[in-house]
Amino acid sequence: MSDSVLTEPPAEVDRQRRRFVWRRRAGRVGVYVLAVLAAVVAAGPFLWSAVTALKLNSDLYTATNNPFFFNKPATLDHVLFLFQDTPFPTFVVNTLWVGVLVVAITLLFGLPAAYALARLDRPWAGPAGIALFFVYLVPPTLLFLSLTRVVVWLGLQDSTWSLVLIYPTITIPVCTWLLIGFCKGLPKDVEEQAMVDGYSRLGAFARVVVPLLFPGIVAVVVFAFTLTASEFIYALAFISPSAEKTVSTGVPTELIRGDVFFWQSLQASNIVVAMPIALLFTLLLGRFVAGFTMGAVKG
Amino acid sequence: MTQATTATRPPATPATGRRRLADREGPLASLFLLPAVVYVVALVGVPFVLAIGFAFSDVTAGDPSYDWAGLDAYRRVFDDPVFWQALRNTLVFTGVSMVLIVVFGKVLANILIADFRGKWLVRFLVLLPWTTPVALSTVSWLWLLDSIFSPIDWLLRQVGLLEGNMYWLGRPSLATASVIAVHVWRLVPLAAVIIMAGLIAIPRDIDEAARVDGAGFWRRMFEVTIPLTMPLIAVAALFGAIFTFTDMAVVYVLTRGGPTNSTQVLASWAFVRGIEGGDVAQGAAIALFLFPLLLAAAVLILRAVRRMQVM
């Protein structure tokens, strides 16, 4: 850049510099405006939820009140109601319980599979990895009817165990793909050195590779847990008693009774669930991107 | 590689059977992969075949014994005008959402990679629609589009554009727009993250070279960045399409398919028939209509990924 500028007359340089500075400033303003706009559109419904959750009934159900502000004092009553007088705590416990087990199963099956596909130099590794990834694209809406029959045959209907069994079919494929990416990101020398030092291939995997994959495993845990918590159709089809429901199905089916909507409590539950998950995702975003793209790179 | 590692191992090592298996890469690779493959085949492959089987049967929730019924279920499906409505809705929702998701996703990706103060907060807020369980965020929208207390109506009333209410979810055209809006809103962040991955991967010097040659922002975007990230833009588009195409949570929570089935989609209609109505055969037959389009999407993604590897 500097070379081409130097050969031009000073007036031209000055003009170009001013234009450059102006453009840069316009660009900065543009970025801020767009960023704020995007944030408002994306988070708007949640901000609206947060305000709603803390409103008194008399404030909320007056159509002429400004819906974005507290026209009467804020109250925690409906948040407390959510935790004390609705089955919401049960839904949270069920979601966490199913999530933890599904994540454990996913890692147990996914870690070795990912290592085999990323590192063990089989000619079928590439196609097998892609095939596994495509299983992720087979949607629950295509399978829920037959899986409902399977769950009934196994005697697991109306129990969270049915979700523990079925959810890994969603998480194993996509998480294995992520883990393949993270495995490829590790330098090969590390395991080779471990094997020179006397570990077997298996030993190198268990004692050297898995600990080094820790940051990737954290990302996979969060991803798998989120997929589990978000799933809707299986949970809706398999389970009807409210004591066994998860957050995803419990909130929209149990906290809405016919025409009675516990609006403030509903919105509170949304915020309680949404915030921690989004926070974790924001922190780990870089790792997800790295994992997914590395998975597609030839090892 | 296999030969190399085994050859360099000192021959003095006591070679027990277990030890040898732990070092032989071929069997080890199969052994590592097998559990995952068995799990997925048993609980995805088998149910898929079962779904096809159910579509040609007379299975109901009340009478789950299997009897071959040929095309009976399909006849029941085709005779119902709601099915055609659902098929049309599914295609419209998917097509419109896909275009909007890609356009907004591309814009959002550019914002996400830009460097500015408060970047983390913006990222956090922008990711919310994607990371929140869809059934819950749709509950937010349900309240946002409430027939009496919608704040959008309130704003329109304040500006003087509206008297009374819009009844967003009560009129077929507005309900359709609402469902599409929710899909676009929840999937744009995902598309943005995918496209962002492509933007990050573009080597810096290509962009700089274009700058030196005097290419402005728009020229660089349309002649350098977009062609280079095309495979990932395609992947983002297809993901957007697949997740809209196969979703039933948004419709189920927001409109229950109404008003009068005007927002019913294949997935929700399969649920209504198969689970709520107990006609498993018919539900399975409806759900199978999702498959051809999914297959096409999968093939297209595969081709996009291939192109990425060539780069």
Image (cartoon, coloured by chain):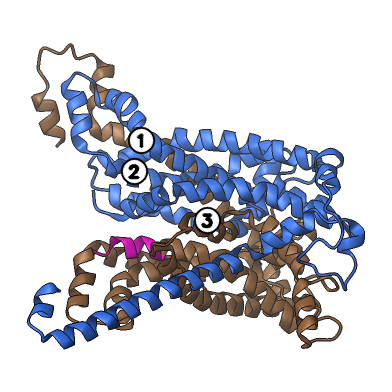
Chain colours: A blue, B brown
Q: Quadrant of the N terminus of chain B?
A: top left
Whether marks 2 and 3 lie on the same chain: no
Disc 2 crowd rating (10 Å Cα; few below 14, some 14-19, many 20+) is many
Mark 1 touches mark 3? (CB < 8 Å): no
Q: Magenta span covers which residues?
A: B195-203
Mark 2 touches mark 1? (CB < 8 Å): yes
In this view of the protein, which residue sits in the foreground, B66 or B50?
B50
In this view of the protein, which residue sits in the foreground, B66 or A48?
A48
In this view of the protein, which residue sits in the foreground, B165 or A158?
B165
Q: Which callout, 1 or 3, points to the residue nearer the camera?
A: 3
Q: Which callout, 2 or 3, points to the residue nearer the camera?
A: 3
Q: Could you give the CA–CA distance between mark 2 and mark 1, rounded to whole angstroms?
A: 7 Å
Residue B102: x and y in percent read: 47, 73
B209 horizontally vs B257: left or right: left
Q: Mark 3: which amino acid?
A: Leu
Q: Dot 3 corresponds to which residue?
A: B121
Q: Mark 1: which amino acid?
A: Leu
Q: Which residue is drawn at 50% across and 73% down?
A: A33
In this view of the protein, which residue sits in the foreground, A109 or B77?
A109
Residue B308: x and y in percent read: 28, 64
Residue sitting farthest toward the left: A7
Whether marks 1 and 3 lie on the same chain: no
Q: Does B84 appear above or below A278?
A: below
Mark 2 or mark 1: whose residue is earlier in sequence: 2
Residue B101: x and y in percent read: 51, 72
Task: Return the chain for callout 2.
Answer: A
A216 horizontally vs A86: left or right: left
A175 horizontally vs B93: left or right: left
Q: Could you give the CA–CA distance between mark 1 and mark 3, rounded to whole angstroms?
A: 28 Å
Q: Dot 2 corresponds to which residue?
A: A182
